[in-house]
Amino acid sequence: MNKSFKIIFISVIFLISIYSALAEIDLMSFEANIFDSNGGFK
């Protein structure tokens, strides 16, 4: 393997791993319900 191929290969693997990590963030969500002191939904 020549040096330029190794650099390109490592760069592609690095970019794929970053893309995968950012895609995981989109899968997480948060939902909450707020109630008053009488138990009524606000």
Image (cartoon, rainbow, N blue to C red):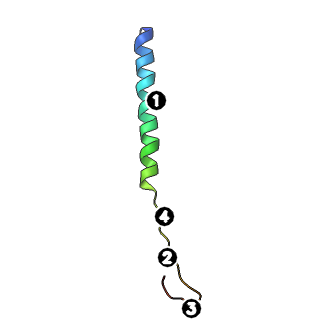
State if disc 1 and disc 3 touch (CB < 8 Å): no
Answer yes or no: do the residues labelled 4 and 1 have beta carbons within 8 Å?
A: no
- Circle 4 — which element? loop
Q: Residues within 10 Å of mark 2 (few under 14, many from 20)?
A: few
Foreground disc of the pair 3, 1:
3
Query: Which residue corresponds to the image point at 59% horizontal and 88% vertical from the top-left?
Result: 37
Amino acid at the residue labelled 1: Phe
- What residue does disc 2 label? 33
Reading the image, the residue beneath label 3 is 38
Identify which amino acid the numbered label 2 is placed on.
Answer: Asn
| C-alpha distance separating marks 4 and 1 | 29 Å
Q: Position of residue 23 (x, y in %)?
A: 41, 46
Q: Is residue 7 above or below residue 16?
A: above
- Whole-angstrom CA distance, mark 1 to mark 2, is 39 Å
Looking at marks 3 and 1 on the same chain, the residue that comes earlier in the sequence is marked by 1
Q: Which residue is mark 1?
A: 14
In the rendered view, tell whether residue 17 sits above or below residue 28: above
